[in-house]
Structures are given as C-alpha cells and as structure tokens.
Image (spheres, helix red, strand yellow):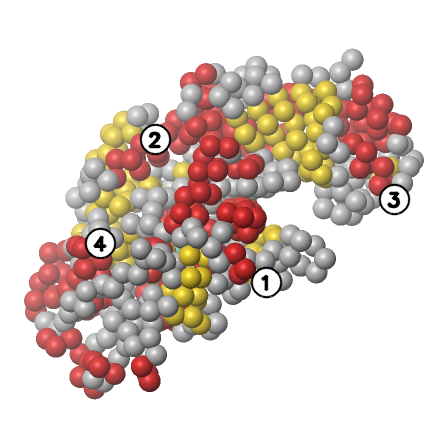
Amino acid sequence: MSGDVLRDALERIDGRPYGHYRDLRGRDFELGPLCLRFDHVQGDPFAAPSRVRVDAPPGVAALPAPLRATADARRAAADLVQRQVRAALEGVRPGAGSGKSGLLEIARPGQEVLERTGARLDADGALRLRLSVGLPAAGRRILGRAAADLLCDRLRETLLSALRSLDPAALAAHVACVEDQIALRAALGPAGLVAFVAAGSHLPRRSGADDRPLAGALPLELGGVEAVELEAPHAGVLRGLGIPRGVTLIVGGGYHGKSTLLQALALGVYDHVPGDGRERCVADPALVGVRAEDGRSVRGVDLRPFIGALPLGRSTRAFDSDDASGSTSQAASIIEALEVGATGLLIDEDTAATNFMIRDARMRRLVPGAEEPITPFIDRARELWERRGVSSVLVVGGAGDYLDVADVVLRMRDYQPLDVTARAREVAAELPLGEAAPRPADPWPAAPPRVPLPGGLDPSHGRRPERVRGQSTRSIEFGREEIDVSALYQLADPAQVRAVGDALLELSRGLCDGRLALPQLLDAIDALIDHEGLDTICRGGHGDRARPRRFEIAAALDRLRSLRVAPGGD
Ligand code: ADP
Ligand code: MG
C-alpha cells in the first residue's frame, strides 16, 4: 500500500539520533496518489525546518484545462492553490515534540500574484508543492511514529482534501483577475499610457508593515479627470485614471494621497489578488522607482548626464563611491535603471535629493554654472522623454519649477485626482522662471553598459563556498557582505528578495564571465527562469522564493560593495 515505504522507513528510525532522518534525503516516497521527497533534512529539531517537495499528478487537483492553458493562468492558479494549501495546513495540529517538531507549512504569499516556488502548476495539470516540515523529535531522538503520523496521515489527508476541494469558481475568478491585469498592462502602450488606475480602486495600505487594503479608504473617483477607457477580457470596458507617457506631475497638499498613488503605480508592475484594491491598477512593467539613498556604493557608473566634472577636474565617466551623497546616489540609480531597460521613472519629492531635482533662480545666479557639476533632473526630464522615450512620474509638492516641464499635472485633493494641467500652464505663464527656466542640458553622453567582473562576486563565507540569503525586504547577505536593498520599494515580497540573492549566486557561478554586459546577464537570468522555471536559479528545494524583476536584481548587484566592473565596449 502506498505510504508504507515511508511509514516503515520512519518507524525503523524511531528512537534513533536525529541525524538518521538524513537517510530519507533524495528518495521518492509514494503517498497515496502523491509523491513526497525530502530535498533538505534539518540537522536537529531546532534548525531551519526540512524542505519537502510534494508532487500531485494531473487529475488530483481539479484544475480545468482553461485554467492552465497559458503560463500566466498557471501562475495565477498555482498562486491560489498555495494560499488554499496554506490555509488548510494552518488547521493541522502540530503534535508534541521539541523545537520545530510537527511544523507543516507552505510559504505565505503576499498581495502579489507572482511566480513562486511554493506551488507550481504544469500544463498537464501536475502540481508541485514545496513545504517546510519540522521532523518530530523528543530532545534529539527521532519520534518516528509521530513523523509517520504527521506525513503519511495528516499531511497526506490535508493536502488531498485541499486539492480535491478547490473551488472552481474561486479559481476561475483568480485566474480571470490576473488575466485582466495582464491585458490592461498590455493595453497601456497602444493607449499612450504608462499606468492606469480603474475607478473604484482602493490604493492605501494598512501600514508600511501590512500590505493589505486600508479599511474604510475612499475609492478612487474620476470626477476631476477625463476618464480613460481600457478593455479587459473578463471585466469588459473599464474607466479609469490614465497616466500618459511623457512627464507627469502629481501635485497637491501634504497628506492628500500623492505618495499613496505613486506607490500604487510602483507596485502596478505586478498582478494583485482579487480584493486587494489594486487589482485594476496597472503600470508599465519597466517603470522603476528611484530615490536618494546616501551612503550606498556606486561602481563605474557614467554619471555625466547628471554630474559633470567634479572639483579639481575629477571625471565622472566611470564613477566609484563607497559613500555616495543623496544627489549622487539618485543620479546613479537613474543611470543604472536606464542601463537595464527602464522605460519610465517614478520619483517622490519626499525621498529625492533637492539639489538633484531643481536649482532655483537665486542659486543659479549666486553660484556660476561652471562651478556646479550637477545638472538637475528638471533640466533632463524633457530630453529623457523626447529623445530617449523615458517617461517620468513625479510627486512634487514644493518645486513649482516643474510646471514648466510637465505634459500633465494631476492634483490630489482629498485622495482624488484632478487634472489641473490647464491651470498649471496659466500659473507657469503668470510666474515665469526667467533665468531659472529649465534649460536643455548638453547632449546626453551615452556610455555603453558596464561589464561586471567575476572577481567581484564572491559568495563564500569562512569555510562555506556559498552563503547567500535574503532578510525580509531590507537586505541580502552575500558571502561576507550585506547588500542594503531597503530603498528598492518595488521588491514587494521577502520571497523576491531571497530570489534576488539566488540570482546573484547564479551570476557568480559562471554566468558573470567578465565579457557579458549587465543587460545581457539579466537577459540570461530571465531566459533561464522563462524556459526552465524559477527552480533553476532557486536551487535546493526552497519553497519560499518568488520571481523578481530584472531591475531589482540589477539594483541589488549595483549595491554590492565588492562589485567590480569594466567599462562596456562597443
Ligand atoms: P501625501 O504624499 O500627499 O502627503 P500620502 O499618500 O502619504 O499623502 O497619504 C496620507 C495619508 O492618507 C496616508 O496615511 C494614507 O494611508 C492615507 N490615504 C491615502 N489615500 C487614501 C484614501 N483613498 N482613503 C483614505 N486614506 C487615504
Ligand atoms: Mg508624500
């Protein structure tokens, strides 16, 4: 009978030292129609739990063919499966034992529907789940019978009942919701938009630490703007706020919802779960939010578009710093985002360096231009759009000079958008900037993309050849270094941060060869994930990984202090 081999194996090691659990590693065990395999076995009951993979062949879960017809549908369906399995496992009694004995868990997805290693659905309907299991022990002695009860009975029954009772209507709604977001995102370009927020969207979150919708928030209304219509395959024609390509300002008084809107656009690059409030708020997937981040490292970046020759003639053609200033860090982050293909920038005045954003009339008069290495962003915003096709969405509460460079000005009042473009033009004409008017800067110097050198990527730590791990959404330990990723606010989920760590490790394992430039390296990572799945870069059977964007992988690499680059050649 199925399950007996595993049961026998567990009962045979009952009472033995904990290390005997290792005998189970790498073997396939039948568990009813399921198949279980230990990818990693914990060394003791207090260590990080064991990693177990459970395969359900086609037909175990009722997943109708249309729900697995495309990679996007499979991602969405698997996402719901992971959530339902998690809920089901939460109901399982842990049982007695020391340390993590009896733990049964699948990683908790956040509000985004991402490709994840916790649950994967194949085109034929086969499902692969990756769980954390605390193998039971009393002290350091194996509780083999308890383990058999946990895995062969409770785990098996819970999974089978969860997979067999998936609600087809909920699954269809989940997949439809994601398909709509994908279609809306695809409709942005043809409609000349970088983002779209449907009427009725709930944008604010409960807190910085809780990404669920804020209760009682006011839904977005279109009374003050001309509605844009986009069509979604399931929801039909939706009316909403369109953020056009070009330069858009979001202005308004403090606390009126400017940053909330920008943040929603930043995360509109991902699909959201039904009921999130942002499931009809979509953005161009290549929008990158940048902020000032003093103290970060910068390696070989051509800062000349924003920062010209430094005092004493020091060049900024391949700029290095271990402790960049606010303005330098923001300039570097923009150049780096463009280097790997950003099509738009999101900037919030709250987190920008003032001297990077503007230079007003009095300063332009007091300090001669030749002495000021900084070309403020305001002097580049139009050129970025007109010559390089890069849009900007800028939250501006204080720097009215920006009215001169904007295509569209939206004013947030009581959390609702008003199109004040016409009024902004009048104001700009009434109060001309004169000598402080944004001036076309020197032509943008275009250095080819940098080439990371393999010697700068060392994942080793002490005697361990590879030690890399993501910590929440704030940092990644890479070898002996800690990469600060807290400024990357489009890392939506700690699971993405862990996968960014995996991607860096993958680069260090040979992809980064000193010849491929940064964009090519990211193409290679994306191709690996597209063709072979996230498991290819997230090795070791981890179920707590989610796919990051190329921009965040690049940004993490850019913040690695040991990074060394050669200038690109072409
Ligand atoms: P600003 O950037 O204009 O100063 P924020 O976007 O930070 O304003 O918003 C200020 C506060 O208002 C935040 O606490 C936010 O959660 C809340 N808020 C934003 N949008 C809404 C809304 N639609 N309904 C209710 N509260 C909101
Ligand atoms: Mg704000």
Is residue 534 rendered to the left or right of residue 10? left
Of circles 2 and 3, the one toward us is 3
Would you say the beta carbon of the disc 1 residue lies within 8 angstroms of ligand 2?
A: no
Residue ID for mark 2: 180
Residue 152 x %, y % = 76, 24
The amino acid sitting under disc 4 is: Arg
Instruction: Say whether disc 1 or disc 3 marks the residue closer to the N-terminus.
Output: 3
The amino acid sitting under disc 3 is: Arg
Q: Which mark is residue 481?
A: 1
Q: Is residue 92 above or below residue 520?
A: above
The alpha-carbon separation of the residues under discs 1 and 2 comes to 41 Å
The alpha-carbon separation of the residues under discs 4 and 3 comes to 63 Å
Is residue 406 rendered to the left or right of residue 538? left
Residue 482 sits in quarter: bottom right
User: Can residue 279 be seen by looking at this rendering?
Assistant: yes
The amino acid sitting under disc 2 is: Asp
